[in-house]
Structure formats: structure tokens, C-alpha cells
Image: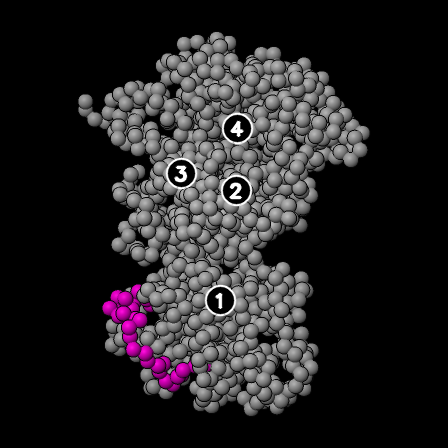
């Protein structure tokens, strides 16, 4: 079912310079065997190759780290985690030291304590900025470490002037290198986790700094705006373009009708900003909060997620019909999903020749914007120029997406502002609202509450599962529950980097009315095997695209879901910080739990969507009007920078 | 067909990439070749992206690598890049006067390029010419024994040669050496003897001789070979570390130029011992002028079946050597940084363990040995371990080469058995009455006159071969400032203590020079020195604070008694 050899595993993800650091556990009989390490007098048995850091965690010894991140490969550069290992003259980095034989470690010798404080002193001697004015105030690893390890004054000074100009060029990400501590987590994220290769280290020694190719502004390089670097930055050096003040200004303007659409992933995570456990859904409390902040209407972005399934699914059926029945060479399969703007920009930069594979359907965010300023404006009798559409997204790239010049099909900018979960949390706090304590309230009409299929868009594999629920029912005419228990299509779920699934279409039913004008019957699908793929994180996406180009198993697919961020939207670059595999798993749990709780769990059964086709998009899915409002085109960018 | 400049550059890059089989490990040689062969003298953004595309790496990574190495330019520079050596012996012999002359002649400051695009003026770290300091490089050519007047004439010559399309050729004089054991070595005797033995007998012979690495770290060579021989790997590598960057050393350059064959013979013996079949010599960019000679020697050895298949008739013993040029980074003398550089990355030291003998170049078992180590191995195999271990002291076997420079009458390369005192050394080189001696280069030990009875040997000062003699009039803080400027410049920049700590130490030394450093702050700095020594990732950081610790210990009165600069007393 899953093709592990293709997955971007952690070893293959190591940065070029770290690939050689792989711990070679010599003889094969040693694999799986253990050794004992004594840490601060406590013996702990660990598998060979375990780092001192991980061994210490097992027994509750906290070793401070800064350049270490569980999602990333080892760097061992900040030296915050140095410990004394018996037999060594110098201190060793606990994050990088593999235990291969009985070892005695002391994590709190006077020299270790002094080294920790000195390293913090040295960082603070270069770290420009006041905590009060920093977005990461109270959520900054440098700040916490300074507190924990007794930094009492600026022993080696503190900069009074900024050294670098802040890079505001990108619509999504702000780089303030004055706050950078050169831990290189962003570099490893960009190069090894995402394999985008936008951020790098320039120069050497004290002159080294994190920058882009030829030190160009972020807006003019291959940055895909995924924002994964923000999630892993320990300080405020990387952050999103903050638009909260712009949104406040709109809310404060009585002539504006300000509406917000909320994506599923932030609802499962925003509680983290208010002290709740990861995976605590606060969807309906948040609706109340948004109204109290002053939004005129609160919509569920899952509505357009359901709409996306209808549009993208119809497009797929048309493509397959053209390709399989009409043998039309212009119909390119597999069709790629297009909801993730990070993935879109990645493809535009690195595989512009694959653009024909992309579904022309807009992302749910942009579909919603276009509908609010047309359908909703008409219905409510509001001049669309007075409507402000805000989108709450788990994503940094959505900011870039809503600023794409082609996203003005309503005649206005379809979506005015994309807010990250972090930005909204800030607004909620600023408004004096204690979110977890609020009463629950529902979404506003005419878009209503969406289906479970829309909710799972937030997790990797979710779009595929939602699409399959609909396609299976449309084609077979039978309930998907007949094939998959509780309509849970488990094969496409999970966190493996890439997944491949096959669905045998053994029986077909009549073509539903909605798309009857597009295909005469389903006979051509009878006995066929529908092959689908899922990839999350651009490193995995790259493997799948390369596999397709090489004629591998993914080239046989009909439909592939791509998400730019590891874990899908729930691991998005606009989500609360910190992030880890465990946190992402909990958010996924929340999302699937929410799906299971919905009465309607299939996009094509969403009554409000069906009504839209009756009232507004009267020529049906992929018809003229929907093409104008709900579909788009892409820009081949290439990777060469002028 | 009309080709645009970019088309030409593209064609050149395509050819270079094809020559190197599109291996990303060849990134550095490709960038070097683009720089010289494109005619621009630098690697343009266009070129970097094109190279990245062909080698399958990110353009940002190419940029990152290019900006790491000082001898790769990413911005236009002059046709003649003048690099004046900034090592302490050069400064002592008048490099600053030469610098002023150059600035006045060219009308630019250091770090600038003349408006006509002819000359770029830069300081550079030690270029291995300390015994005939001051010295400078013009492109890859070296000029030594500079005076202000000579510098002026050299610039004139450059211009004339440029106009008449003649190459500029450097001028250096011979280096004084005493009688070296290497001169008695019968060519390839060591290799022949080795091939008569089994692999383990060769390693045994090396172990018995007691020889330890001559690069400075002093790791027992026999043990290193044993580990590499025992390690499993589809292939194994012998790397000769000819990145002689430690300020004040030039003995490897003498070996490379005068005893070239010994180095390759030693590599071949090492290959036989550990079962390697690929060898690389990593030659520092400052020694580019030696490259041709090394290539000729390798070619000659191939013809004589001293390299290649079934060497000297030994069935199944295949080994060949290639040259890899460095690109101006002192830290690449650290073995794991060197390996990173070989793989086409920034020369940043790796985390250890794992060690190169297990996981080295291309993840394969790799032996990295210094030039002198390999040359001495030939003599050990030829004359036996007993002969070698009878020289020196109980803990320090054999002879050692020392590069002597600074305030002494007879600078040069000397061979002595381990165990002589500094006092004896000074007698030999005409340096009696010195104030202090720097033993083992900038990362070594600064020994004051009161400690001249200390012994050169692993029991006391078992370090690399650089000896810099400081006379009575030398300012210890000027020396320390020079050292820290070097370390700040040459730190790779990945680990905090070395990158930021050395900057703080440099600032502190400057405060001391201005008489503005409080005793309390000096104590803070000494404390910081200990952290840098203990917490840095590699030897560079671990050893860089030595000088401040030493002058604080031995010359505290001198450094704290400065008049305050810029303040009325």
C-alpha cells in the first residue's frame, strides 16, 4: 500500500553535510542490541547509537538545546547541549554524540554550567531586539534558556543598533536577521525537510549569516512561502507578515462588511495558543470569539472544501474520460491537487513542465473569496466593494496566494487577508477574550456547516479521502460505507511521506444528474482500478514527481494529493509554535474525531453546495460560471533567478 | 555562429560538469575552473545557478560553498589579486610598510579593487613563506622577501607583463634546511619493502616505530591505520593533508617540492596497509604553484607502475592518486572539514564520533595523514621501526621537522630528534635572548623565556612544527591581536563558542591594547577562554584561546600596564 522506498525518511533527509554523520552500527549482530549509559549517576539502557540527549530525556534529565529540533537531522553547532563524557578532555554535544559502548556522562559539572551560560551570553551579545516588542515574546527558546540558565546580565555586551535590514519583501514571511542565532534550523528545514533550497548560510566565521541565493530578497528567490522555517525558528528571526492591524482597521471601519472563513486545521490547533493541549478542537468557541471581535459573519471554509471536491472531482472525471475513452493526448493524468499554495509555487519553480497535471480548481480559500464577493453579495444585497474577506488559515503561503494577480475573478480582490492561526490568537488575546471559556456557536448561513469531508482537508490524505468518498458513491451509486467501514478510507490516512492506494471499481451505477451532461455513462470505468497517491511535504512531493517522470508506480496514478507541508495543513507554516511529530499527530486525531462527529460526511451531500449549483452556478460543476469564478491558471516560474 | 557571453559561459560549465561526471563532489574544482577559464575572475550568479542545475544541487548551496572559500570570488575582482600575508612573522618583518606602499601605489585600501579593474588588494592568512617574510601572492604566484621598493617594482612588472601578454611569474628564494633524513632515502625503498610484507606486518612496523601524526594532533599512526584496515567499506581512501595552513609552518611545502616522491610513496604504503585503492592529496590553494610538479610526479609514477594496477607486480594491489586543490580555508586542515571540502561542501568540521577511519570521505573508511607523516613512513619502512624508534625520547619517537621563523638569525626548516629543549633550538637558529617562542603555530603554546627549558616532545610540547621566535621588543598584545584576527577570519562559523567567542576575545585584546580593559573583564575573558576550549566543535576553537591564556599568565604586568588611549593621563 505504501511505498516506503520513496519516502523522504530521516536519513535521506539529512543535509548533505550531515549525511556522512550517519551512525554506523557496525556488525549486523549489533543491530537492536543495547548498551548502558550512566547519566548523572543513573544507569539507563539504550539501543546502540542513541544520542546522549535522547538517553537523558528517558530518565528525566533535561539538557538544554537550541540548534536541535526533533524534526530535523543533527547539527551539533550551538553547543548549548554540551556535557561531560568520561574520557574526553573537551565537552561533547549531547545531541550529536551516539552511545555505542558503556559511557559515563555528567550533565551538570561546573564547566558544563559555565559553558551553557557563556554560550547564551555570546548569543545575547549578537541578538538585537527587545523581548517586549518581539512576536515571540514568551514563546522564544532563547528567552526561556536565558531564564533557565541564570543569565543575569549582558556579560559580553548587547547590540544597540541593528546590523541587518529586515526583509519585508515576501507577502508571507519576514526575515529579521538581527534576531538570528545561527542555529541553522531554518536552513535544515528548507534544504532537508522541504528540499526547497531557498535558505542557506553565506560566508564564514563571524561574517556568516543565513540568507538566500546571492543575498536576494525572499520575494525574488525560490521561496515557496510554506513557512516551515517559521515553525522551527527558536527566536523571532522568522515570522509571518503580520496583517492583524490591517484586519483591525477593517473591523473598525463601519462601512465595511467583514467576514471570515476558517479552515479546519487552525481550529484543531489554536487552543495551543491558549494553554490547551494539542488536539483540543475549539471550532465553535472560536466562532463566538470571531463574532465578539467584530466579524460580521463567520463561515466555514469546509464549505468550499466540499465545493472543491465537486469541482476537482468533476475535472478528474472529465480528464479520465478524455484520456481513457477519447484518447485525447491533451488530457494529462495523473491529476494533481491544487489546494496547497506552497505546493503550487514549488511546482511552478521546480517542475513548471508539470503544470498541465495540476487541477485548475482554485483552493477552497480562493473559491470562497470569489463566491462571497458575488453569490453572497447578491444574496445579501451588499456592494462587493464594501466586503472584506478574511481567511483564517494554518498557512503562511495563503498570504501569497490571495495576493496573486489572477485571484480577482469576482472583480475585486477575492480574499483580502490571510491570517495565520498565530495572528488570530494574537487578535483574540488583544480583544480580551479567553477563548476556551467561550460558549459555542455555529457558522453563518448561507454556507452553513460543512461536511466531515471538508474537515479532513486539514490532514495529509484528507483531500484524497474526501474525493474518494464522493467518487465512489457517484460512480457506484452505492454508499461508501459498503466498501469502507464508517466511510473511513484508512489506506490514504497516516503520516508516511508518500502513500499509494488502489480502488477496484467492480460495479457502476447511473450517472448522477449533476454531471450527466459531461459523461454519458460509467461503463468505461467498470472493472477499472482507480490508482491514487498521497504525498506531504515538498521533499516527498519531489520524490513522487521524479517517480512520475521516471515512469515509476506513481506515473500509473490517476489522481495524487500533494500538500506542501509535512503532515498536511495541520503541520502548516501558520500553525502555533512549537511543532513536533507528536503535536501533529494529536492535531490529526482532533480532525478525524471532528469528521466522525458530523452527520453529513460526504461533500456531494452538502445541502448548501447543492443549493449553490441550483441557484448560482446553474451550468453545473466545471461549467462556464464555475470556470470563471472557481478555476484558475498557473505561472511557470522556473528555478533560475535573474 | 554568434555566441553571447552567457552562452560561452554555459558551454564552459557544461564541459566542466561533464568532465567531472556531474558529481556534486566536484563543485569546488568546477567553481575554480569557471573562475579562471571564464575570463571573468569570478563566478557569476548565472554561472552558480547553471553549475547547480547540472550537478543537481540547489543554487543556494553553490552560493553557500562559494562564499565560504576565500579563493572563490562571487563578485568581480581585479585581474591581479594581490594577497599580502598577514602572519606574525610577516608583520614583524615589515608587512605593514609593504601594505602602505601597495595602497599608495594603487590608490586603494585593502579589500578594494582599482577603478580600472586591474588590481585587488587583500590580506590573507599565512601563505607558508614565513622564513622569507613578508610575502604576497599575486593570483597564484608567490613573491617573498618583500620590501616597499620591491612591492612597487612588482606592480610595475605586472602591468608591463599584462600589456605584453606575458605571464606574471613569482619569485621566491631557497629555504635553508639542515640535513634531512629524507635526502638519504633511496627512492621507493620503503614501498618495495612494504610490498614484501603482509598488510598487518606493515601496520605492525608502523606501530612499532611509535610514529605519531605530524600534523599537530599526534594521533598514533599505527592505530589509525589499524582502525581503517579493520573498518568495512566498499572502498577506502588515503587522503594526504597538504593543507598546511597553520601560521608559521612551511615544512610540508619543502617536502612537497623537494621530496615529492616520498609523499606519494608514503600514500601508496598506507593504501597497501589498509586496503585502499583511491588516494587524494588535498593541496592548499596557496601552494598552487606546486601543482604542476605534483602532477608530473604522479604521471611518472604511473609510468613506472608505482601507481595504477598491480603496483610493482603485486597482484591485486591497485591504487591511484589525484590532486584536489583547496580554496583558501585554514579550517580545512581539520580532517573532517577537509573531507567535507572533498565532498564539495563548506569546509565545516563534522561531529565526531563517528571518525573518518570508519565514516570518512563518501562515508567510507578514510585515512587522513599529514605530508610529513607519510614521508617519514617511507623511511620507517626502508630502515625499520627499530632505527626510527631509537631516535627521540621514550615517549616521542623519531625525528621531526620544524619550520622556524621570526626573530632569529637562521630561519628555515630544521630536522631534529624529538626531545630538544627550546633553549637548544634557539641556540641552533640564532635566536638566543628571545622574549617568547610560539611552538606549534597559532593554536600551539606561547612559551616565555622563563620556560625555555621545556622540551619538544609528546611528554611536554608535542605539537605541530611551527616555531615563531619573538624578540624582546615584541608587543605581546599585538601578537595576540594578530592571532585573533586570524581565528575570527578562519573560524568556519558553525559553532557558537568559536564563531562568537573569538570575536569577543579579539575585542578584549583590543581593549587591553587601548588600556581600557578592566581586571574584572579580563577575568571574564579568561573564563570565556576555558569555555571556548571545552565547548568548541573542533580543534580550531578548542585551541584558539591558548595565546590569551598564556599572555595572561606570563605577561600580565605587561598587558595591564597600558596607557589609556584617547584619554589624558
CB within 8 Å, label 2 to label 1: no
Q: Nearer the viewer, mark 3 or mark 2?
A: 2
Estimate the spatial distance between the alpha carbons at disc 2 and disc 1, rounded to whole Å. Answer: 41 Å
Estimate the spatial distance between the alpha carbons at disc 3 and disc 4, rounded to whole Å. Answer: 21 Å
Q: Name the residue under label 4.
A: B217
Q: Which of marks 3 and 4 is in front?
A: 4
Estimate the spatial distance between the alpha carbons at disc 4 and disc 1, rounded to whole Å. Answer: 49 Å
CB within 8 Å, label 2 to label 4: no
Estimate the spatial distance between the alpha carbons at disc 1 and disc 3, rounded to whole Å. Answer: 38 Å
Residue A614 locus on image (x, y percent): 47, 90
Estimate the spatial distance between the alpha carbons at disc 2 and disc 4, rounded to whole Å. Answer: 26 Å
Discs 3, 2: same chain: no
Q: Mark 1 points at which residue?
A: A568
Boundaries of the magenta span: A424-451
**Left or right placement of residue B409 versus residue A277 in this view:** right
Which SS class for mark 2? loop
Image quarter of the N terminus of chain A: bottom right
Residue at horizontal 65%, vertical 79%? A504
Discs 2, 4: same chain: no
* In-front residue for pair A267/A62: A62
Q: Which chain contains the residue that carries disc 4?
A: B
**Left or right placement of residue B6 versus residue A570 in this view:** right
Amino acid at each position: 500500500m505504501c511505498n516506503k522506498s520513496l519516502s523522504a525518511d530521516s536519513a535521506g533527509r539529512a543535509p548533505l553535510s550531515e549525511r556522512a554523520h550517519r551512525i554506523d552500527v557496525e556488525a549486523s549482530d549489533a543491530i537492536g542490541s543495547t548498551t548502558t549509559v550512566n547519566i548523572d549517576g543513573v544507569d539507563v539502557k539504550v539501543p546502540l547509537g542513541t544520542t546522549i540527549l535522547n538517553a537523558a530525556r528517558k530518565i528525566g534529565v533535561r539538557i538544554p538545546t537550541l540548534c536541535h529540533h526533533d524534526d530535523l537531522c543533527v547539527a551539533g553547532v550551538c553547543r548549548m547541549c554540551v556535557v561531560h563524557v568520561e574520557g574526553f578532555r573537551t565537552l561533547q554535544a549531547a545531541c550529536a554524540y551516539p552511545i555505542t559502548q558503556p559511557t559515563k556522562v555528567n550533565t551538570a559539572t561546573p564547566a558544563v554550567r559555565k559553558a551553557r551560560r557563556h554560550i547564551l551570553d555570546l548569543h545575547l551579545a549578537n541578538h538585537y531586539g527587545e523581548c517586549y516588542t518581539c512576536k515571540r515574546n514568551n514563546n522564544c527558546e532563547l528567552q526561556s534558556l536565558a531564564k533557565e540558565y541564570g543569565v543575569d546580565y549582558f556579560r559580553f555586551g548587547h547590540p544597540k543598533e541593528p546590523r541587518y535590514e529586515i526583509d519585508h519583501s515576501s507577502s508571507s514571511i519576514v526575515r529579521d536577521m538581527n534576531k538570528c542565532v545561527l542555529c541553522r534550523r531554518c536552513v535544515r528545514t528548507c534544504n532537508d525537510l522541504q528540499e526547497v533550497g531557498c535558505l542557506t548560510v553565506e560566508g564564514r566565521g563571524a561574517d556568516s549569516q543565513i540568507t538566500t541565493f546571492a543575498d536576494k530578497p525572499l520575494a525574488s528567490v525560490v521561496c515557496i512561502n510554506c513557512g516551515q522555517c517559521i515553525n522551527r525558528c527558536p527566536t523571532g528571526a522568522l515570522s509571518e507578515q503580520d496583517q492583524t492591524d490591517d484586519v483591525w482597521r477593517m473591523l473598525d471601519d463601519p462601512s465595511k462588511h467583514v467576514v471570515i472563513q476558517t479552515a479546519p486545521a487552525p481550529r484543531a490547533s489554536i487552543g495551543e495558543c491558549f494553554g490547551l493541549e494539542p488536539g483540543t478542537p475549539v471550532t465553535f468557541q472560536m466562532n463566538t470569539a470571531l463574532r465578539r471581535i467584530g466579524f460580521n459573519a463567520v463561515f466555514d471554509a469546509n464549505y468550499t472544501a466540499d465545493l472543491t471536491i465537486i469541482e476537482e472531482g468533476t475535472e478528474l472525471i472529465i480528464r479520465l474520460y478524455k484520456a481513457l475513452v477519447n484518447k485525447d493526448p491533451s488530457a494529462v493524468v495523473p491529476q494533481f491537487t491544487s489546494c496547497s499554495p506552497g505546493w503550487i509555487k514549488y511546482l511552478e519553480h521546480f517542475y513548471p513542465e508539470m503544470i498541465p497535471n495540476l487541477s485548475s480548481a482554485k483552493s477552497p480559500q480562493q473559491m470562497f473569496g470569489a463566491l462571497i464577493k458575488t453569490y453572497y453579495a447578491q444574496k445579501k444585497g451588499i456592494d462587493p466593494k464594501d466586503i472584506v474577506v478574511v481567511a483564517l488559515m494554518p498557512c503562511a503561503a495563503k498570504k501569497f496566494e490571495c495576493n496573486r494577480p489572477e485571484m480577482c475573478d469576482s472583480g475585486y480582490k477575492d480574499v483580502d487577508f490571510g491570517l495565520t492561526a498565530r495572528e488570530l490568537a494574537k487578535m483574540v488575546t488583544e480583544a480580551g477574550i479567553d477563548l476556551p471559556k467561550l460558549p459555542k456557536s455555529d457558522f453563518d448561513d448561507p454556507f452553513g456547516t460543512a461536511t466531515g469531508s471538508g474537515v479532513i482537508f486539514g490532514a495529509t490524505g484528507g483531500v484524497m479521502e474526501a474525493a474518494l468518498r464522493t467518487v465512489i458513491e457517484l460512480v457506484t451509486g452505492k454508499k461508501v460505507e459498503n466498501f469502507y467501514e464508517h466511510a473511513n478510507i484508512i489506506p490514504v490516512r497516516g503520516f508516511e511521506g508518500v502513500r499509494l492506494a488502489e480502488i477496484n471499481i467492480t460495479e457502476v451505477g447511473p450517472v448522477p444528474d449533476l454531471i450527466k451532461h459531461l459523461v454519458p455513462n460509467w461503463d468505461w470505468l467498470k472493472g477499472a482500478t482507480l490508482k491514487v497517491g498521497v504525498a506531504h511535504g515538498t521533499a516527498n512531493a519531489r520524490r513522487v514527481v521524479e517517480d512520475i517522470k521516471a515512469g515509476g508506480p506513481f506515473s500509473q496514478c490517476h489522481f495524487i494529493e500533494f500538500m506542501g507541508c509535512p503532515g498536511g495543513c495541520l503541520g502548516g507554516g501558520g500553525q502555533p509554535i512549537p511543532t513536533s511529530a507528536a503535536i501533529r499527530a494529536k492535531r490529526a486525531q482532533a480532525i478525524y474525531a471532528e469528521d466522525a462527529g458530523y452527520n453529513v460526511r460526504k461533500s456531494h451531500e452538502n445541502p448548501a453546495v447543492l443549493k449553490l449549483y441550483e441557484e448560482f452556478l446553474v451550468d453545473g460543476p466545471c461549467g462556464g460560471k464555475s470556470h470563471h469564478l472557481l478555476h484558475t491558471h498557473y505561472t511557470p516560474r522556473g528555478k533560475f533567478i535573474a | 555562429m554568434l555566441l553571447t557571453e552567457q552562452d560561452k559561459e554555459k558551454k564552459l560549465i557544461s564541459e566542466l560538469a561533464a568532465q567531472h561526471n556531474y558529481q556534486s563532489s566536484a563543485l569546488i574544482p568546477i567553481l575554480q575552473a569557471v573562475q579562471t577559464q571564464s575570463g571573468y575572475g569570478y563566478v557569476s550568479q548565472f554561472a552558480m545557478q547553471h553549475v547547480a542545475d547540472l550537478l543537481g544541487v540547489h543554487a543556494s548551496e553553490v552560493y553557500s560553498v562559494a562564499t565560504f572559500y576565500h579563493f572563490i570570488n562571487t563578485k568581480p575582482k581585479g585581474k591581479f589579486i594581490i594577497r599580502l600575508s598577514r602572519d606574525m612573522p610577516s608583520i614583524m618583518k615589515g608587512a605593514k610598510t609593504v601594505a602602505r606602499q601597495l595602497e599608495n601605489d594603487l590608490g586603494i585600501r585593502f579589500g578594494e579593487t582599482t577603478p580600472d579593474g586591474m588590481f585587488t588588494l587583500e590580506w590573507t592568512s599565512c601563505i607558508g613563506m614565513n622564513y622569507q617574510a613578508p610575502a604576497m601572492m599575486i593570483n597564484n604566484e608567490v613573491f617573498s622577501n618583500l620590501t616597499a621598493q620591491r612591492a612597487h617594482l612588482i606592480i610595475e612588472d605586472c602591468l608591463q607583463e599584462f600589456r605584453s601578454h606575458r605571464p606574471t611569474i613569482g619569485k621566491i628564494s631557497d629555504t635553508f634546511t639542515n640535513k634531512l633524513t629524507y635526502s638519504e632515502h633511496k627512492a621507493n625503498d620503503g614501498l618495495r619493502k612494504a610490498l614484501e610484507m603482509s598488510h598487518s606486518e606493515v601496520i605492525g612496523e608502523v606501530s612499532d616505530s611509535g610514529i605519531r601524526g605530524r600534523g599537530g594532533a599526534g594521533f598514533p599512526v599505527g592505530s589509525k591505520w589499524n582502525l581503517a584496515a579493520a573498518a568495512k567499506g566498499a572502498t577506502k581512501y588515503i587522503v594526504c593533508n597538504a593543507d598546511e595552513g597553520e601560521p608559521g609552518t612551511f615544512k610540508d611545502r619543502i617536502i612537497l617540492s623537494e621530496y615529492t616522491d616520498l609523499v606519494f610513496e608514503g600514500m601508496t604504503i598506507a593504501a597497501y596497509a589498509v586496503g585502499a585503492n583511491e588516494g587524494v592529496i588535498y593541496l592548499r590553494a596557496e601552494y598552487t604553484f606546486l601543482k604542476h610538479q605534483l602532477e608530473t610526479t604522479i604521471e611518472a609514477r604511473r609510468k613506472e607502475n608505482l601507481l595504477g594496477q598491480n603496483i610493482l607486480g603485486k597482484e591485486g594491489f591497485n591504487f591511484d592518486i589525484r590532486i584536489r586543490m583547496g580554496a583558501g580555508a585554514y579550517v580545512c586542515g581539520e580532517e573532517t572539514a577537509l573531507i567535507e571540502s572533498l565532498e564539495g561542501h563548506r569546509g565545516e568540521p563534522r561531529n565526531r564520533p563517528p571518525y573518518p577511519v570508519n565514516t570518512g570521505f563518501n562515508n567510507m573508511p578514510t585515512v587522513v595523514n599529514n605530508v610529513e607523516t607519510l614521508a617519514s613512513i617511507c623511511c620507517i619502512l626502508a630502515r625499520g621501526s627499530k632505527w626510527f624508534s631509537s631516535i627521540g625520547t621514550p615517549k616521542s619517537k623519531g625525528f621531526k621537522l620544524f619550520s622556524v621563523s621570526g626573530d632569529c638569525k637562521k630561519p628555515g626548516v630544521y630536522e631534529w630528534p624529538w626531545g630538544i629543549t627550546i633553549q637548544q633550538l634557539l641556540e641552533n637558529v640564532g635566536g638566543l635572548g628571545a622574549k617568547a617562542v610560539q611552538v606549534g603555530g597559532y593554536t600551539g603554546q606561547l612559551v616565555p623565556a622563563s620556560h625555555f627549558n621545556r622540551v619538544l616532545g609528546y611528554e611536554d610540547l608535542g605539537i605541530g612544527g611551527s616555531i615563531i621566535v619573538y624578540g624582546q621588543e615584541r608587543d605581546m598584545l599585538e601578537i595576540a591581536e594578530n592571532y585573533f584576527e586570524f581565528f575570527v577570519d578562519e573560524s568556519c562559523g558553525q559553532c557558537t563558542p568559536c564563531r562568537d567567542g573569538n570575536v569577543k576575545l579579539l575585542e578584549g585584546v583590543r581593549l587591553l591594547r587601548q588600556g581600557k580593559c578592566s581586571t574584572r573583564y579580563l577575568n571574564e575573558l579568561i573564563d570565556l577562554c576555558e569555555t571556548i576550549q571545552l565547548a568548541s566543535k573542533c580543534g580550531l576553537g578548542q585551541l584558539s584561546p591558548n595565546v590569551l591564556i598564556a599572555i595572561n599568565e606570563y605577561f600580565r604586568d605587561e598587558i595591564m600596564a597600558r596607557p589609556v588611549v584617547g584619554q589624558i593621563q
